[in-house]
Image (tube, rainbow, N blue to C red):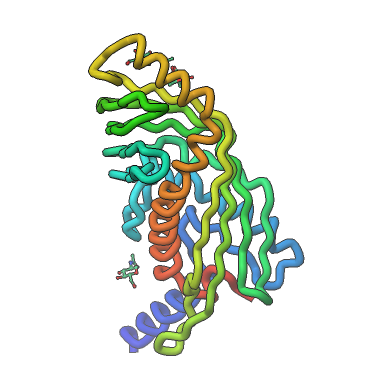
Amino acid sequence: MESRLIAATLLLCCFGYACAGNMPDYIKICHRNDPELSKCVKQSVHNLRPYLGKGIKEINVPALEPLYIGDLNILEGGSSGITVKAKKLNIFGASNFEITKMRASTQNRRFDFELLLPLLQGDGQYDINGNILALPIKGNGPFVGNFTNFVAYVRITYDVRNVNDIDYFEVKEFALKIRTGKGRLRLENLFNGDKVLGDVINQTINENFELFTNEVIAPIARALEVKFLAIATKILENFTYNELFPV
Ligand SMILES: *[C@@H]1O[C@H](CO)[C@@H](O)[C@H](O)[C@H]1NC(C)=O
Ligand SMILES: *[C@@H]1O[C@H](CO)[C@@H](O)[C@H](O)[C@H]1NC(C)=O
Ligand SMILES: *[C@@H]1O[C@H](CO)[C@@H](O)[C@H](O)[C@H]1NC(C)=O
């Protein structure tokens, strides 16, 4: 009798717990029919930022600070006649975004975000080889860079997938475009330290920064898509559709 009562109490408690949707601090739920859904999703994503920075251990979300991109082929020979590789690229500041525009549509199962990245800092190793204006250019070494006011456009489309009678969000598409802002790079040890030539190249890069980064940014955007999709998937697979997005 007593054990039954305990069992019943436990059951009730568990049920109550689930119903109350006792969610962790990093999740701020939004109601599906919220007339200001976009505003809610925006706040919810803003709330998530510090957790993304440090990572969320309990659901295996890796820290976004720093964001390790690894090796990238930035320019590959071809018409420009110059090959540029970045190695061990790390980016700092990706979790310090500000959502400047947000549109959530449950009808189209689609979220569009415009994010401002006020300051990104990068470091790594570069490897440059080729010719610029018949001038042979060769060098490798560390580089650092500051990038200000980059803008990211993110489009997420999703489906609701039923697994064993429970609905889950399933990300169908995560597309990212980046509009470059201002920036400054410093390549150390160009021409094995030849100061005059090094400064000429440094200056050329920095004067043409926007041109340069627009070529460079596509592979970085692809790498970021992969990272962010992995993060979104980790979060979404650990909560049900009704937990995250109750009626
Ligand atoms: C990047 O910004 C930091 C802090 O403002 C500064 O100390 C550093 O020299 C800058 N780096 C470059 C390559 O401009
Ligand atoms: C250019 O590169 C050299 C190293 O080759 C570095 O010492 C110098 O500070 C850089 N100049 C600029 C303007 O970034
Ligand atoms: C998160 O979801 C994955 C995949 O379904 C699962 O393996 C893992 O145990 C879940 N983690 C938690 C803490 O629920």
Query: Picture coordinates of residue 111 (x, y %)?
Result: 61, 64
Residue furthest toward the top? 196
Q: Nearer the viewer, residue 234 or 145?
A: 145
Instruction: Name the image quarter holding the C terminus.
Output: bottom right
* Residue at screen point 26% across, 14% down: 193
Side (left or right) of 236 relative to 180:
left
* Quadrant of the displayed image that contains ligand 1: top left
Q: Position of residue 103 (x, y in %)?
A: 68, 60
> Which percent across, then down, holds residue 198?
35, 16
Asked if residue 112 is positioned above or below residue 169 in the image, the reply reads: above
Q: Can residue 92 be spotted in the picture?
A: yes
Figure check: 129 above or below 227: above
Outermost residue on the front side: it is 134
Give 29 or 76, whichever is nearer the viewer: 76
Specify the quadrant that holds the N terminus: bottom left
- Residue 152: % across, % down: 57, 47
Query: Which residue is at 34% across, 45% downward?
Result: 76
Where residue 148 sits, quadrant-wise, is: top right
Count the marks: how many?
0
| Residue 89 seen by the camera | no
Query: Residue at 52% of width from left, 55% of height from top?
Result: 176
Name the residue rendered at 57%, 56% in the picture: 154
